[in-house]
Image (cartoon, rainbow, N blue to C red):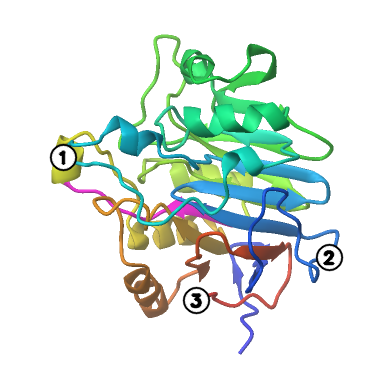
């Protein structure tokens, strides 16, 4: 049955999958998508592409094997469990690239350098990580550093509002700027919250409720002492992600940050089952890598997408 309930004061958006739509470097919207709708692709890990008309936004794209090369022979070798859904050198027409923090699977030099010969995007990064972004190949002329509480205007009606992220703690540089950010991206009438790598922190639900996100892209690979003690800080559990959406009045949860590295993942079927069991859960999507999802704001026919 259609789910016509509201979470908080916001109407749930529709998030509908489009099977059989292969991802290509131009990220064309599916034929059935209306011009006013936004198409989203999960690129694996925390990476996403969002298309609205002629604007293409990438968030935290990790499309290389930089980490496998860096950690070969180490405790966590970072070998991919699936190939990149698209080669970064094949991508065209990128308006902006948003990096939430400086970890390589979110600010990847392999992806950045492969994008630049055929794209001239604006890069939005935490101001605290500006030097790292330059080291990884971002041109100074295309780089915008930002911090929580600010607002960045992009092409047309697209805006980016940074918020703090805790990976696993809120961290600042010597100037007081946050090292880890999330972004509330306004695109095509939708307000999409990408938390970056994050765990719950005090005041987070109230902050997000005030910002009025329609859709939350949250990492659900969890955390434990073994990973943290070996240099792998964690993220929300599935339960914590659902609880944040409930507390913040965010109508739809889309899970990510699983399935790429075998030491840092969760079983997506277990995630789906946990979300089905929740009596008060928001509508939700556990996506598939490289698949297209069409987003419609303010629709009252949202269903859970398995």
Q: Residue at x 51, y 68 (%)?
A: 284
Q: Is 131 placed left or right of 14 in the picture?
A: left
According to the picture, the residue beneath numbered tag 1 turns out to be 75
Instruction: Give the mark nearest the N terminus, 3 or 2.
Output: 2
Q: Report the front residue among 107 and 302.
A: 107
Instruction: Give the mark nearest the N terminus, 1 or 3.
Output: 1
Q: Quadrant of residue 243?
A: bottom left
Number of labels in the image equals: 3
Give the quarter of the figure containing the N terminus.
bottom right
According to the picture, the residue beneath numbered tag 3 turns out to be 306
The reply to whether residue 167 is visible in this rendering is: no
Task: Indicate the secondary structure of the residue bearing disc 1.
Answer: loop
The reply to whether residue 273 is visible in this rendering is: yes
Task: Indicate the secondary structure of the residue bearing disc 3.
Answer: loop
The reply to whether the magenta stretch includes residue 222 is yes
Q: Residue at x 34, y 47 (%)?
A: 235
Picture coordinates of residue 23, whole percent (x, y): 64, 58
Q: Report the front residue among 22 and 224.
A: 22
Q: Are marks 2 and 1 in contact (CB under 8 Å)?
A: no
Foreground: disc 2 or disc 1: 1
According to the picture, the residue beneath numbered tag 2 turns out to be 34
Task: Indicate the secondary structure of the residue bearing disc 2.
Answer: loop
Q: Is 139 placed left or right of 278 in the picture?
A: right
């Amino acid at each position: 049955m259609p789910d016509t309930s509201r979470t908080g004061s916001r109407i749930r958006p529709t998030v509908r999958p489009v099977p059989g739509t292969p991802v290509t470097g131009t990220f064309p919207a599916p034929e059935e998508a209306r011009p006013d709708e936004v198409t989203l692709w999960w690129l694996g890990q925390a990476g996403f592409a969002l298309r609205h008309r002629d604007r293409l936004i990438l968030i935290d794209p990790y499309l290389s094997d930089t980490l496998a090369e860096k950690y070969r022979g180490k405790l966590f070798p970072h070998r991919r469990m699936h190939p990149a859904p698209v080669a970064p050198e094949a991508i065209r027409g990128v308006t902006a690239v948003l990096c939430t923090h400086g970890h390589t699977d979110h600010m990847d030099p392999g992806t950045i350098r492969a994008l630049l010969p055929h794209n001239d995007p604006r890069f939005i990064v935490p101001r605290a990580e500006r030097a790292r972004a330059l080291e990884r190949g971002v041109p100074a002329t295309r780089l915008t550093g930002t911090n929580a509480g600010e607002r960045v205007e992009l092409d047309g009606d697209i805006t980016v509002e940074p918020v703090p992220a805790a990976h696993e703690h809120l961290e600042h540089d010597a100037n007081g700027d946050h090292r880890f950010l999330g972004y509330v991206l306004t695109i095509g009438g939708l307000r999409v919250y990408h938390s970056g790598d994050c765990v719950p922190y005090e005041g987070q639900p109230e902050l997000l409720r005030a910002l009025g996100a329609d859709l939350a892209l949250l990492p659900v690979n969890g955390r434990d002492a073994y990973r943290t003690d070996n240099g792998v800080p964690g993220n929300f559990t599935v339960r914590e992600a659902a609880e944040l959406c409930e507390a913040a009045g965010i109508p739809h949860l889309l899970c990510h940050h699983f399935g790429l590295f075998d030491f840092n993942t969760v079983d997506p079927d277990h995630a789906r089952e946990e979300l089905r069991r929740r009596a008060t859960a928001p509508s939700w999507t556990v996506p598939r890598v490289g698949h297209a999802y069409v987003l419609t704001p303010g629709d009252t026919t949202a269903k859970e997408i398995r």
